[in-house]
Image (cartoon, coloured by chain):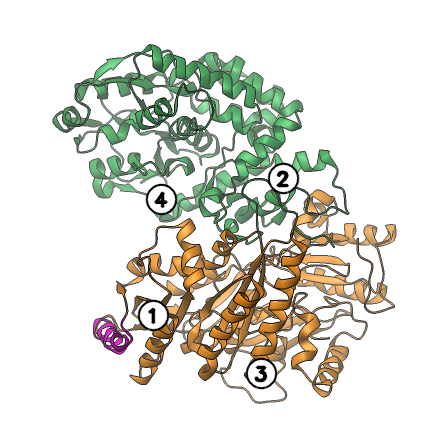
Amino acid sequence: MADRAAGQGPDCVLCGCCLEGCPLLALTGREELSPRAKALLAGPSKFTDAALPEADVAKLTGLCLACGRCEKLCPQGVKVPALMAALRARHPNFRQWLWKQWLTRLGPFWSLASQGAALAPAAFVPASFSLALKGLKGLRPGAGLAPWLGITKFPAQAFGAQYAGRPVALFDGCVGKGPRAAWGQTARFLLRGLGANMVEARFSCCGSALGVAGLPDEQQGVRRENIAAWRQAARPLIATYCATCRKGLAQYAGCGLFESADEETQFRAAVVPLSALLAGARAKVGRGAPTVAGYHRPCHADLNDGFGDADFTLLSGLLGARLRTPAKGGCCGFGGIMQLSAPELSTLVGRGCWETLDAALGFSAAPEVTPAYVLSGCSGCVMQLAATAPAGAKVGHWLEIIRTG
Amino acid sequence: MTTTTTGASLATALSPAHLRFLEGLFPGEGLVVEPACMAVYGADSSRRSAMPWAVVRPRTEEQIVELLRWAEAERVPLVPRARGTGMSGGAVPAFGGVVVSCLWLNRVLDVDADDFCAEVEPGVVTAEFQALVQKRRLFYPPDPASLKISTLGGNVATCAGGMRAVKYGVTRDYVLGVRAVLPGGKIVTAGGRAHKNVVGLDLARLFVGSCGTLGLFTRLTLKLLPLPESSATLLGAFGSLTGALEGARGVFRAGILPTAMEFLDAKACWAIGQIRDVPWPKETQAVLVLKVDGSASALAAEISRLETALAPAGPLRLLKGLGATEEEPLWELRRLVSPAGFHLGPDKLGEDVAVPRGATIQAVEGFQAIGAEQGVHVVCYGHLGDGNIHVNIIYDSKDPDQAARAQKSKEAVFRLTLSLGGTLSGEHGTGLTKGPYVSWQLGENERALMAGIKNVFDPSGILNPGKGWL
C-alpha cells in the first residue's frame, strides 16, 4: 500500500467532488475515465510500489473531453484537462500527429475539407475519422440554418457609452474563418449595427484545441501570432462568437508572451463575447421560425469573467419563451482529440446530450410537428451536435438565425 | 502489493485460470486488468490506496451469483465498490482481491407513491435519486455531504448520515429491505416493502453499515416520505464557539426541531474563506447553519422564531434563505469544508466521532485543546444537532515529527470521545483508518459476537477482508 505523495502545484486529494460533473463517467459508468482517476495518474505516482506502464497511462489520459466541468467543481483548483494536455505533450504519438495535421494543415481549408467530407464515400473514411468528418459535413457551406430573426433595435447608445469609439476586432476562429464564413459576415453586420469602430486583425486559431491535444509549442506559436496581430491593430476589443475561442483567449493569462503585466491585464479585459456587446438589443421573429428553439449551453461558456453565458442571456432576451434549455445542460462530447482517439465515447456522450435536450424540448414525441432545432454558441458544439443529431434535426450557431438583409 | 494478512486460506493472487474465468463471466469492458485503469479502483476519499488484482463490472444479479460462487470456491477476496467516496478506506483492497464495481447496476426499478417506497440498484447516485422522487412529491431524507457524488449502495454499506439526521435520522432509518448475494452464491432477501416488520431478526438493518463484509447488494428497498412543501435556512455567525453552541441550545429550548443544525469552528470558517467568498465577518469564531422545513406559509414564522431563539447568544450576523435557490449557497459553503481543510496543510486525518448531545461543547473544546497542545491544526465542524463532530487533524506528512503529533492527536481525540461516552465513528465507518481502534470501544464479548455473525454470512472471510470491526 502506498500513501499519497505530495506534488507540485494543486494536488488531487481524491475527494471526488469532480465526479458530479464528468460527462464521460456519467454515460459510461467507467470510473477509470473519471477526472479523479486521471488526476491520480497524472500526479506524482501514488502507487510507488506498482509501476504503471507509461503507454497505458498515456492511453487512458487521452480519454478526456476537455470540457472543463471538473475544474469548476474542484476545491483544490486541479485542472485535469491541462494535466492531460501536459501528459500528452510528454507522450507524443500518432493520434496527436493526426490531430496536429487536422488543425494546422486542414484548418485554413476547412471549407474545402468539409465539401470533400460530403463527397467521401463512408467506406473510405477511416473509422476514427468518421465522426469528425460527419461533423464537418454538417458544416459544409450551404448547410446552415435559414435566418428568421430581424434585429429591430441595436443597443448602439449603450455600446457607445461603454466603449466610446474603442476599436473592435472580430476573432473568427477556425470555423468562422473556414467552413462557416457566414458567421463572420453576420457578426460584422451586428457590429456595424452597433456603430462599432471596426478594425481587422490577422488572428489565427485561438490555440485551445492545440493545447488540449498536447501540442504546447504549437499553441504558444498561435498565441504569439494572435498577440502580435492584436498589438498591430492597436490593441482593440476582441469580440468572440465561439465559447471555446473565448475561453482559449482568456487562458492567455500567464502564458508568458506579454510585454508586461499591464499588457496582459489589458488583453484579458479586451476579450468580450459578441453577444455581451449586443445586450439590450430587440428583435422581431419572422417567417420560418421554429415554435421551440433549443439552446445548448457549451461547457466553455460559463467563464468566470463577469459575462457568464452571454449568448444565453442575449438569446433568452430576444426569443423569450420560444427558447428552451435543459436545466442541467449536458456536454456535447466534442472533446477535441477524443474525436480521433475514442470516437465511440464521443458519440456516446453526444447521444446523452441529445436525450437531455429532448427532455427539455420534447421533439421526439412528434418530430414531424416540432422537429429538433438547436442553437449554440461554440464551433465545437455545433460540429458535434450536427454529427450526432437525430434525423431531421436542425443545428446551428445562433448567428445563423439573424437576418442581415 | 501487500500480501494477504487475514484469512490464512485466502488466495494471494489471481491465477491464469482465475483470469480466464473472469473474462468469461465479464466480457468486454466488464473486466479491467490494466494497472493504469485499475489504479482509481484501489483508492478512495480516505487517500489510502492499493492496487486491485482485477476489477469487474457486473450488469446483472446472475453475474454476481456466479462471481460469489466462484470466489467462495477459490477463496478469492472480493471488495465491493461504488463511487469510492468513503472517508475511512472501506473500499480500498488493502489486503488484495478483486474489486466489484457496481456502477453498472444503476437502475431505479420502482418508485411507488402509494407504498412510499422505492426499489433501486446499488449504483444509483443519491442526489439523482432524490431529484427523481422529488418530481413525484416524495422525499428521501438522508443527505451525506457527498450526496451528489456518492451512491445509495455506498450509503447503505456505510450507513451514511448527513445534515438532516437530527430530524430525519440516518440511512438505516430508510432501508426497508436488502437483497444481497452471499459467498457461495446464495441470494437473501431481507425485509420488504412493509414499513413495519418484526418477523425474525432484522437482517436488513444488519446489512446497513456492514461495509460490504456480509454480502453484495443487488437491490435496495428504501422508505420515502411525503416531500415537505418548502424549507428555509438561517446562517448565524458568532464571536465565540460558546456563543454558537449556546445559540444551538436556545433553539432546542424553544421547542424547535430543525431539519439540520450544523456548526463550523474558526479554522473551518477560515479554510472555506480560502476557496470561496464567505458572508461572515472577519472576527467570526463559529458559524451555525440551521434548516427548517414544512409548509411555505409557516416557514417565515419559523425563521423568526429561530432568530428569537438565537438572539440571547448575540450573533454577529444572521443570513436567511427561503426556498432551495436562496438556501443552496449557504449550504454549499458547509459542504466545502472537508476539501477546504487542505488549505491548512497537505495531509489530513478525518475523524467523525459522535458524543452524547449534552457533551458537545466539552468535546469540541477538548479537541481544540488537543490540537493546541500537539501543535497541529484541528478543525471541528459538523452535525451539532446530533453530537456528531467532524474532527479534521491537518498536518504535513513530510515532517515526521508533525505526522507523529497528528497521530497522537487522533488517539487523544478518540480517548476523550470515549471518556465522554461517545463513539469513534458517527457515520464514516471504521474501514481501514479506524479499524485498529475498534477494540478501544467494543468489548471482547461484543467483538466475538460480531465475528460469529460475520462467520455465518461469510465463513471463508472473502468479503472485504480486514475491514470494519474485526
B318 and A162: which one is in front? B318
Above or below, B80 against A336 in this view is: below
Q: Distance between the residues labelled 2 and 3?
A: 44 Å
Chain colored orange: B
Read off the residue under disc 2: A42
Q: Distance between the residues labelled 2 and 4?
A: 47 Å
Read off the residue under disc 1: B291
Read off the residue under disc 3: B419
| Res. B92 image quadrant | bottom right
- Left or right of B90 in this view: B386: left
Magenta extent: B298-314
Q: Residue at x 33, y 43 (%)?
A: A325
Tell me the chief SS of the magenta region: helix
Amino acid type at circle 3 is Ser
Q: Do the residues labelled 2 and 3 touch (CB within 8 Å)?
A: no
Chain colored green: A
Q: Could you tell me which secondary element the residue under label 3 belongs to?
A: helix
| Rendered location of residue B26, percent (x, y) | 73, 52
| Res. B87 image quadrant | bottom right
Read off the residue under disc 4: A366
Q: Mark yes or no: residue A132 visible.
A: yes
Q: Which chain carries label 4?
A: A
Q: Which chain carries label 2?
A: A
Label 1: how many residues lie within 10 Å, few (<14), some (14-19) or many (20+)? many
